[in-house]
Amino acid sequence: MRKLATLLVLSLSAAPALAQSNAELMANDHYTRSHDYDLVHQRIEVSAFDWDSTSFAGRVTTTLVAERPGLDSLVLDEGALLENTAVSDRRGAALRTSRHGDTLVVFPSAPLAFGDTLVFTVAYRGKVRNGRGLTYITPDGLPHRPRQIWSQGEDMDNHFWFPTWDFPSDKMTWEVVATVPREDMAVSNGRLVSDVTRGSSRTLTWSQDQPSATYLVSLIVAPLVKIHDAWKRVPVDYYVYREDSAKAWPLFHITPDMIDVYSTLTGVPYPWAKYAQTTVADFFGGMENVSATTLIDGLPDARAYRDRPWYPWILIPHELSHQWFGDYVTTVNWANTWLNEGFAEFMPGQYWLTRLGAHTAQDYYLDEYRQYMNIDRRRPMPLASLGSNNIYPKGALVLEMLRDYLGPEPFWASVHRYLEDHAFGVATTDDFRQAVLEATGENLDWFWSEWMYQAGYPKFDVAAAYDSTRHTLTLTVKQTQDSVLPDTAAARPGMPASVRPEASRVRFTVPAVFRMPLVVRVGTAAGDVTQRVEIDAREQTVVVPGVQSAPTMVVFDDGNHVLKSLSFDEPTAWLANQLSRDADLWDRGWAIGQLQKRTADGAAEAALADAAVHADYFLTRVEALEALGDFGPGALPAATAALADTSAAVRGAAVAALGQLGEGSAQAASLARGAWTSDSSYEVRAAAATALIRLDSAGARDVITAALAEPSYGDAIQNAALQAIAQRNDTTFIGAVDQLVGPSRNAVYVLAALGARGSSRALDLLAGHLDDARRAVRGWALQAFQFAMPRPVGLARLRSAVDGLTHPDAKQAVQDAIRQMEAQPGR
Ligand SMILES: [Zn+2]
C-alpha cells in the first residue's frame, strides 16, 4: 500500500505488556493473534449492488480445518452491518451462530476433531458504512468519475464486506464471483474463470489458486476497458476508464520490464497467474491486492512526462514489488509490516539502479532519507514495532544500507532465501535475519538490534585536524544521538488511547553507539587517501596516515553507506571541492546545505552557482539553485543560465530562485514571465506563475486569473494560483474559487483558509457545500471545517449549519464531527 499519509495501524493484540523492550516483544511474536483453525478456502459471491444504500447481497462458502481437538465453535470476523440470513453446512443443514459486534461465531453440528475439515456457507444482506471495506462512488456530476465500487482490505477492513479471518497470519485460496450491471467490469484476484452476461447483468468468476492473505482479497466494479500487455506468458492488464485508454499504454507499458527486473533480482519469477492494475476514483494511492493492484485514477498526459510523474517513478514499482514482498511472503502481523512496506519502498530504487544507474537510485533514496528525517524528528520509533511511523522510508534506507554492507550478490542471495523459505507463507523480522545467516553465514544480530528493533540513527559530530609534520589527518568522531526517548510523544489526534503504541508500554530505545564500517576519503594535491574505519564507540579518534599535503577535501563515510546525520564544520574550499568532485548525491546535498548557510561568503556562492549550471545530474543543479535563492541578486546569473536547462525540474528551481528575489527585480520578472508564457512543462509554468505573482504585484491579478483557468496535469498550474490566493489572503477571488469547488478539491481548502482568516463570505460558501448536491463535495467541505481551520471557528459553523442540512448522510456526518470535535482537547 502506498499513500502520502502514514498508515494507521490498529492492534487486536492481547493485553498490554509491562515495559518490555520492543526487541523482546518482537522476538516473542507478541503481536500475532491466535485462532484455532486453519482457513483453507473461501468462495465469495456478491451481487445486487445498490449505490444509494451502499448495499449488496453476499454468500460466502468457507472451508477450514480444525486445529484443536473437540472444536465446537469457530470465530470469524464479520462486520456488524452484514446481516446473515442463513448459515448452513455442506448438506444444507442450518448451523447455529451468534454475533458479537464485528464477530461471528459458528457452531458446527458436532465438535470437530483435530484435523477435521468443515465447509459452511453464510448468506447475508451486505451493507457497508461507505469507505469501510467497500467504497461506493457516484458520479456526482463531476468529470472523470464513473459510478464504481472498490474494496480496500488492508489492514483489517475486508471483514466489513465478507466474513473471514481478517488477520495476515493465516493464508487461503479463494474465488470471487461478482454479478454486476452488464456495462460494468468486475476485476479481482487470480485468473478469470468465466464471464457470462445474462439480461442486464454480468457474472465474472475469478479464482486465486495460490494462497495469500485475506486482506489482499479485492474487488472493483466499474465501467472499465482492458488494455492487454504481457510479461513472458503472464497476462499484464491495465483496466482504466474508456476516456483514459490512450493514456494507459504509455504509462503502464513499463510494467513488464519492471516485472523482469524484479524477477531477476530476487531469483523468484513473478509468482501469480496475471498482473492487473486498475484505476479508481478517490483512492489514496495504490494497494497491492494480490495479482490485482488498485491505483488512483490520475493518469499523466503526454506533456506531464516532461516532469517526473509519480506513477512510474514510485507508485507502479512500489505496488508491483509487493507482489513478492507482502503478497508472496507476508508479514505475520502488523508489527512486522516493514517487511511489506520497507521492501516495497526499497525495490523501485533497485529498478532505477538497474535501468538508469547509480545517480537515479541515489536520487530515489535521497527522497526517502528526507522523508525519514522529518518523521524521526516528530517521534523516533523502531522500524520493527507496532504502529511504527517510518516503515516506508526507513525500511528502504536500511535495506539499501544492508545491500551496501553485504554486497549485491550476498544481499540478493539472502533475499532469495527469504522468499523461498516463506513462499506463500508469512514471516517475522527475524526470519529475514535467519535467511541472511543461511545465505551468507553471517549473523547480523547486531545489525537487527541497531536498525530493526531499536529506533533512531547515528548523529555524527566530526572534527578534523591536520598534522603537517606527521602527515596525518585526525578525526574526532562523536555519536550524539539521545538514547533516552521521551515517553510523552504525541499520538495521532483522534487515535483511541487503547491502540496508541505507547499504551502497550513498550520501551523504545536508541542505540548509544551504532556500529558500522565506513570509509574516510581525504583529498590532497597529490591525490586522494582513503582509510577504512570501524565505527564502534560513542567517541573515537580516527587517524588517517599518509596525507602528504594539506587536505583539500574530507569525506566522512565516502559513498554514503551509513544512514546518518552529519555535523562537520569544514572550510568552504573543502565543501566546494566535494560538491564538484563527489559522485554521491547525498554527499553533494549535504555539502550544498553547508554552503547555503554561508550567504556572506563569495566562494560559497560561486561553488553553488557552478553546480547550478554544471553539475552532471539534474538534482544537484536543482538543489544548488534552491540554495542560491538565499543569496539575493547573486543568484541571478546562474538562475538565468539554468532557465535554458534541458531538465524541467532545474528550470522550475531556477524560476523559483528568481521568485525569491522579490518585488523590484525587473530582470527576474521578465525571465519569470518568459517561463510562464512559453515553457513546455506544467510544473515549470506553475513555478513561474508563483514567482511572477511575487515579482510583479501589479500584474499578479492577471496571472492568477489566467492560471486558475489553465488546464494542466494534476491541476499543477491552477493549484499554484489557488495557493497564491490563500497566501495573499486575496478575498477578491472568493467567487472564482467557489466556482472551482467540485472539479477542484483544493478550492474547498482555499475557502477554508480565507474563512479561517476572517472572511465570512468564504465560510458561508463553504458551509453551503456541506449540503452540496454532490456527495463527494459534502465530505470535502466537512473535512475542511474539521481539519483545515481553528477548531472554535469550524465547530461554531458546523453547529449553526447542522439543523438546515437536507441530505441525511451529511446531517449524520456533521453531527458525528461536532461530537468528535467537542470531545477533542483544544488546539
Ligand atoms: Zn505498500
Image (cartoon, helix red, strand yellow):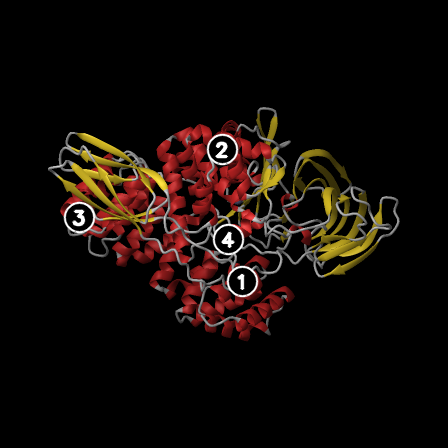
Residue 153, percent from left and from top: 62, 49
Residue 304, percent from left and from top: 42, 40
Q: Amino acid at mark 3?
A: Gly
Disc 2 Cβ-to-ligand 1 distance below 8 Å:
no
Q: Amino acid at mark 1?
A: Ala
The Cα–Cα distance between marks 1 and 3, rounded to whole angstroms, is 53 Å
**Is any part of residue 673 visible from this angle?**
no
In the image, 721: left or right of 223? Answer: left
In the image, 782: left or right of 693? Answer: right
Q: Estimate how packed mark 3 is, as few (under 14), some (14 to 19) or many (20 or more) residues with alpha carbons within 10 Å.
A: some
The Cα–Cα distance between marks 4 and 1, rounded to whole angstroms, is 13 Å
Q: Which residue bears the numbered disc 3? A: 634
Q: Are marks 4 and 1 in contact (CB under 8 Å)?
A: no
User: Which one is in front, 511 or 646?
Assistant: 511
Q: Amino acid at mark 4?
A: Asn
Mark 2 vs mark 3: in front? 3
On residue 503, the disc is 1
The Cα–Cα distance between marks 4 and 3, rounded to whole angstroms, is 51 Å
Lower sequence index among marks 1 and 3:
1
Q: Are marks 4 and 3 in contact (CB under 8 Å)?
A: no
Q: Which residue bears the numbered disc 4? A: 22
Residue 189, percent from left and from top: 65, 38
Residue extending farthest left: 469
Q: Which residue bears the numbered disc 2? A: 250
Give the SS element for disc 2: helix
User: Which one is in front, 383 or 777?
Assistant: 383
